[in-house]
Amino acid sequence: MPTSISPEVIGFIGGIFTTFSSLPQIVKILRTRSMNDVSLVSLCMLAIGIAIWLGYGIMMHAASVIIWNAISLSMSLTQIALKITTAKVTKRQPLPTHATSTVLVLAN
């Protein structure tokens, strides 16, 4: 006798993967203390999208949407905070003058 899987169960399983997909990135950021290649604009856009999905889940009373987007939003805000704090710690160093000269020579 086949059993059907509840859409809520599928939502919870999908939420696990999408929510915790950013965890390895957060761990790497904490280990390397570098977010040079991570865009603050992208992180902010992602956080806004997650917040909208969270609002949708609340309006629809969808537990899986609420739970996973609440966790995702906290992880996204953590990445934004890390981006801002690591940007203050690691200032970009200017190119050495010989590197600039080489680029100029190659461009001419």
Image (cartoon, rainbow, N blue to C red):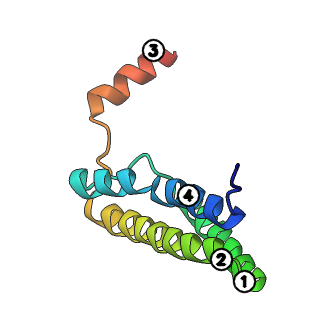
Q: Residue at x 72, y 83 (%)?
A: 61
Of mark 1 and mark 2, the one earlier in the sequence is: 2
Q: Amino acid at mark 3?
A: Leu
Write down the residue under mark 1: 61
Front of the two marks 1 and 3: 1
For the residues bearing labels 2 and 4, Cβ distance under 8 angstroms: no
Circle number at residue 106:
3
Residue 54 badge: 2
Mark 3 secondary-structure assignment: helix
* Residue at the extreme left of the image, as rendered: 31
Q: Is residue 66 left or right of residue 84?
A: right
Q: Position of residue 30 (x, y in %)?
A: 26, 58
**Does dot 1 land on a helix, a strand or a loop?**
loop
In the image, taking residue 9 as reference, residue 1 lies left or right, namely right
Asked whether the viewer can see residue 91, the reply is no
Q: Are marks 4 and 3 in contact (CB under 8 Å)?
A: no
Nearest the eye: 57 or 49: 57
Q: Earlier in the sequence, mark 2 or mark 4?
A: 4
CA–CA distance in space, label 1 to label 3: 61 Å
Which circle, 2 or 4, is nearer the viewer?
Answer: 4
Of labels 4 and 3, the one closer to you = 4
Type of the residue with mark 2: Leu
Q: Earlier in the sequence, mark 4 or mark 1?
A: 4
For the residues labelled 1 and 2, the Cα–Cα distance comes to 10 Å
Calculate the distance from the C-alpha at mark 2 to the C-alpha at mark 4: 17 Å
Mark 3 crowdedness (10 Å alpha carbons): few <14, some 14-19, many ≥20: few
Identified by mark 1, the residue type is His
Q: Which residue is mark 4?
A: 13
